[in-house]
Image: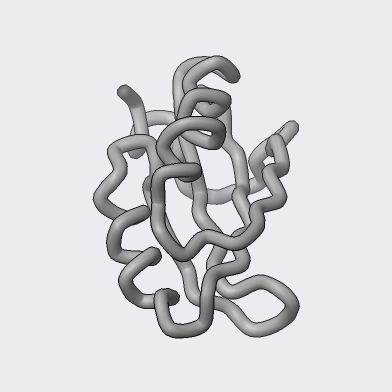
Amino acid sequence: MVTFIILINVDKNRITAVAEELADMPEITEVYSVTGIYDLVAIVRTRTNDDVAELVTSKLGAVEGIADTDTMLAFKTFSKHDLESMFSI
């Protein structure tokens, strides 16, 4: 499993609608509205880097209201929870 964090800026009048649309995508396990320079944070868990590349270049590009994204690859997870079994595909 590969985990990515996508930081998203959204047109201000579309934050809730975009968050709900993203949360419906199977690759995205969580969407958070946040304070700071970004509006939303999406947590993505996929089998391969190619899967997230498809998500970012095709699916996110089709979402009305997304102004900008910054995608980060998580190298290692530090958690007391067994995330691998929780999100196994």
Query: Measuring 51% from the left and 55% from the top, which residue is drawn there?
Result: 42
What count of labels does the image hold?
A: 0
- Judged left or right of residue 9, residue 62 is left
Residue 87 vertical position relative to residue 78 in the rendered view, above or below: above
Image coordinates of residue 17 in percent, x first then y, are 32, 71
Query: Measuring 61% from the left and 50% from the top, which residue is drawn there?
Result: 6
User: In this figure, which colouring scheme has been used for the structure?
Assistant: one colour
Q: Splitting the image into 4 quarters, where does residue 82 fall? A: top left
Query: Measuring 64% from the left and 84% from the top, which residue is drawn there?
Result: 35
Q: Splitting the image into 4 quarters, where does residue 89 fall? A: top left
Image coordinates of residue 80 in percent, x first then y, are 54, 50
- Judged left or right of residue 73, residue 6 is left
Residue 59 vertical position relative to residue 48 in the rendered view, above or below: below
Query: Measuring 36% from the left and 76% from the top, which residue is drawn there?
Result: 16
Front residue of this view, candidates 5 and 86: 5
Front residue of this view, candidates 18 and 34: 18
Image coordinates of residue 50 in percent, x first then y, are 55, 15
